[in-house]
Every structure is written in C-alpha cells, then in structure tokens.
C-alpha cells in the first residue's frame, strides 16, 4: 500500500485563524505522524470547526504555519485530505450511489492506496438497500453514512472529520470506529472534532477551550 | 483523471438542472411568458412590434439567463459540496468553467432554440429571426460567464439572488447593445451584420477566458 508513506507527518506551529476580524483560534501547536489521530475538544464556539476548516484549506491562516512531509508532500494539503463537515455534500435529487460515484471521480487521487467501489463503500456503511434511493428520502443518520462512505471511495491519507458521529446509531459508530482503526493501521492520519467519544484509541487531545495556547495532552 | 472528474461534474450538473427544482426548464418558460406578454402590453401594432422585437427578445433572454444563475454556486455552498470541490485535485477555475458550460446548455440553449418561434409572435421578418438566434448564440455565453462572477460573489449569502442581479446587470450593457444591433442589422440597416456579431463573439470569448478566474477567486475567499 503506497498510502503507508504518502504523508509521514503534519505539524502546526503557532497556527492562528481569524474570522470576521476576530481571532477564533490562537497559537495552536501539534505534531501528527503516520497512523496517529488528533481529537479537538472544546465548548461550543471554541474554534474546533474553524481549526479543521483551516487545516483543510478553506480558511486562510492569520499566523503560524502548517507543514506536511512525505512522498505526497508536493501536493497541497487540501488534495491529501478528506473533509466531512456538518453539511453532507449530497444532492437530494440524486440517489446515494449517484452522489457517491460523482465524488469518487471528483476526489480521485493518483495514489494507489486501498479504495472501494461506490457500491462496496455503501455496503460497508450498511446502506446497500438504499443505494438507489434519492438522498432526499434518507434520514439524517443515513445521509451522514453516505457522506462517510466518501472516505472509502478515494484513498487520501488525512481524514478531517467535524463531528462525524452526529446522528449515527450505535452500529454505525462501531463501523466508523473499525474504519478509523483500519485507516490508522495503514498509515493514515485522522483529525476529528467531537463532543462524543469516537473510539479513537490513543488519540492526542487538543483542548481548545483550556487556554489561549492550545494545551496538548494524551487521552 | 482530471477529464474523468470534469465529465462527471458536467453530467451531474445537467442531471441536476433537469430534475425538479433544478431550474433548467424555468428559464425558457419565463422567457416564453415575458415575450408573449409584450404584444398584450403594446397592442396589435405590427410595425412597432417588429421594430422593437429584437430588443424585447434580448431583454427577456437576459432576465431569463439571470433567473437560474443565483443557484449556480449557492446550492453547492449550502449543502457543503463547494468545500469538497476545493479539496479536489482539479483546479477550481476549470470546475467553474464546466459548471457554466453545463448551465449554459441547460438554460441558454433552449432560449436560443425558442427565440425564432417567439420572434414570429412579434411579427419579425425571417432574416431577423435568424439574426436573433445567431446573436443570442454569440452573446449568451458572455451573460452566463458574467453572471457566474456575481453568483460566486453572493454564494455565501442568503437571498443573494437580487444582489447578484444588481451587481451583474450593469455589466451586461455592452452585450445587450451589440446583441440588439446584430439582430436588427440582420434585417437591413446601415451596419453590416458581421460587425456586431464579431464584437459579441469577442465579448463572449473575453468573458469565458476571464470570468472563471474571478469567480474561483471569489469562491475561495467566500469564507474568510
């Protein structure tokens, strides 16, 4: 699996992000290596989503720097990451498999890591019977599962997940936990913001509400 | 790989435009209603109608093109697709261009096909009917591309459609002037037909070349 070495480290040095002229995220440090996970914790409004969106490249940094190293380090960081945010990125007029097939082609990467066909990815998330249903008729949890199935259709080393377990039932959370373990075992990285436990073992914790400087500890 | 991504995007956009609420058919219905209302408002003066026919068709086409454009990026911004498109390896400029091409095919092409039929209801001459179709064919790409800049600027706003129209309509003035003059030149007059048509083609090409960069820049800084 080439993915094993695609991204060996990601480090943030005094990263700050502004929104609307206010510093939301101040002076964050972290260091992630292949196979590691980082969980961002904090009260509502602490800047978890803002930090994740900045790492994914949707927001400019107002200070500090993000550096990544590895075989794929010439590629910009956004092209190495899967982002699953609050919005599911699904078109309600299309079916689950049409949505997923589109993203499989749109997010395709040159790296040759493990990837599933859209139908297999839906099967893994337990949505096989709903593949040909328009997304408009799916429940919030089912939509979230279709969005999470995107993680499997294109191999990308960094998963950025903003509250991935929202609206998921217990069985789906277990599937997600297994997917996390498999991704980390093959050398992938995960950065997640969450309020609920995600089943990420030995993940580093970044507590955004603790102090001005993000304190880093171990869970 | 990039071709595969762009063709996937192209077909998805066409499929969405065709589906209910996609707005593909809305533009042409709006165009039809607007043009057929004009004779009722102006009265059965055939000379007057045939003289102002090209102008009516062009203004109706302009408004019909803008009608669906506000959703071009806003629906993607609302459902999170726009964020994901930013993480694709395909440059955002090409994504914008492909979305615009699909939008043009879904909304402007039906207008161009319908325009000669509607020209008949405005008592236009046959030469003029061909002229209006050709001028719309040459000019509507510029309208779509200019509209895409406005759509990108207002993508993050709720009810940004009106703001988009206010931003973009003044910029479409040159297209409107040369579009109408091409359509009227086709049925005689002092200006040869090819001059306004070539200027229209030039405006469209300039918009196709420049607008994707402006729209992509607006989309990238949407959140900052």
Image (cartoon, coloured by chain):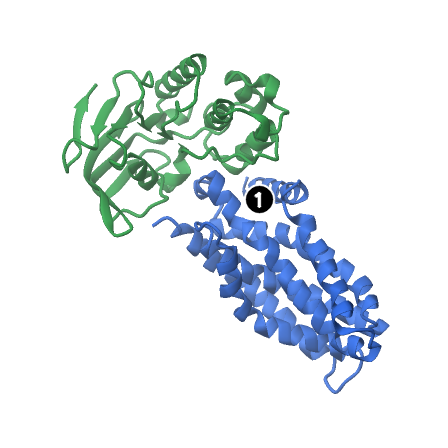
Chain colours: A green, B blue
> Residue at horizontal 70%, vertical 66%?
B136
> Residue at horizontal 59%, vertical 27%?
A137
Q: Quadrant of the N terminus of chain B?
A: top right
Q: Is residue A37 above or below residue A171?
A: below
Q: Is residue B197 above or below residue A145?
A: below
User: Tag 1, which secondary structure?
Assistant: helix
Which residue is more in the foreground, B199 or A46?
Answer: A46
Residue tagged 1: B6
Apparent side of residue A95 relative to residue A67 in the rendered image (left or right)? right
- Residue farthest right in this picture: B126
> Residue at horizontal 43%, vertical 55%?
B218
Say if residue B224 shows up in the picture. yes
> Residue at horizontal 75%, vertical 66%?
B133
Q: Position of residue B94 (x, y in %)?
A: 53, 51
Q: Position of residue B214 (x, y in %)?
A: 46, 60
Total residue callouts: 1
Q: Position of residue A191 (x, y in %)?
A: 32, 29
Which residue is more in the foreground, A34 or B174?
Answer: B174
């Amino acid at each position: 699996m080439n993915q094993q070495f695609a991204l060996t480290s990601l480090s943030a040095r005094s990263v700050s992000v502004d929104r609307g002229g206010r510093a939301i995220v101040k002076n964050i440090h972290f260091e992630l290596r292949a196979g590691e996970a980082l969980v961002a914790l904090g009260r509502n409004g602490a800047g978890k989503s803002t930090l994740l969106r900045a790492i994914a490249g949707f927001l400019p940094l107002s200070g500090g720097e993000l550096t990544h190293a590895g075989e794929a380090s010439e590629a910009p960081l956004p092209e190495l990451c899967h982002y699953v945010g609050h919005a599911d990125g699904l078109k309600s007029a299309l079916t689950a498999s049409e949505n997923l097939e589109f993203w499989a082609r749109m997010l395709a990467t040159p790296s040759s890591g493990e990837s599933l066909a859209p139908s297999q990815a839906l099967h893994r998330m337990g949505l096989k019977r709903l593949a040909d249903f328009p997304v408009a008729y799916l429940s919030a949890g089912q939509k979230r599962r279709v969005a999470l199935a995107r993680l499997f259709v294109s191999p990308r080393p960094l998963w950025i997940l903003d509250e991935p377990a929202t609206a998921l039932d217990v069985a789906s959370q277990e599937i997600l936990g297994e997917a996390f373990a498999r991704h980390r075992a093959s050398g992938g990285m995960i950065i997640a913001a969450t309020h609920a436990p995600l089943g990420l073992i030995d993940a580093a914790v970044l507590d955004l509400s603790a102090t001005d400087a993000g304190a880093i500890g171990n869970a | 790989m990039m071709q595969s991504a762009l063709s996937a995007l192209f077909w998805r956009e066409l499929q969405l435009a065709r589906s209910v609420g996609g707005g593909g058919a809305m533009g042409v219905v709006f165009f039809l209603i607007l043009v057929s209302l004009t004779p009722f408002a102006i009265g059965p003066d055939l000379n007057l109608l045939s003289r102002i026919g090209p102008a009516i068709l062009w203004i109706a086409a302009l408004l019909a093109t803008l009608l669906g454009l506000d959703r071009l990026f806003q629906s993607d911004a609302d459902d999170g697709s726009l964020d994901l498109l930013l993480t694709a390896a395909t440059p955002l400029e090409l994504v914008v261009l492909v979305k615009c091409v699909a939008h043009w095919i879904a909304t402007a092409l039906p207008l161009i096909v319908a325009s000669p039929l509607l020209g008949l209801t405005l008592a236009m001459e046959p030469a003029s009917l061909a002229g209006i179709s050709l001028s719309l064919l040459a000019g509507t790409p510029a309208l779509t591309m200019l509209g895409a800049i406005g759509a990108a600027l207002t993508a993050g706003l709720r009810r940004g459609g009106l703001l988009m129209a206010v931003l973009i309509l003044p910029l479409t003035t040159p297209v409107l002037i040369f579009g109408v003059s091409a359509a009227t030149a086709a049925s005689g007059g002092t200006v040869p037909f090819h001059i306004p048509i070539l200027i229209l083609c030039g405006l469209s090409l300039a918009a196709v070349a420049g607008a994707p960069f402006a729209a992509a820049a607006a989309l990238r800084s949407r959140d900052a």
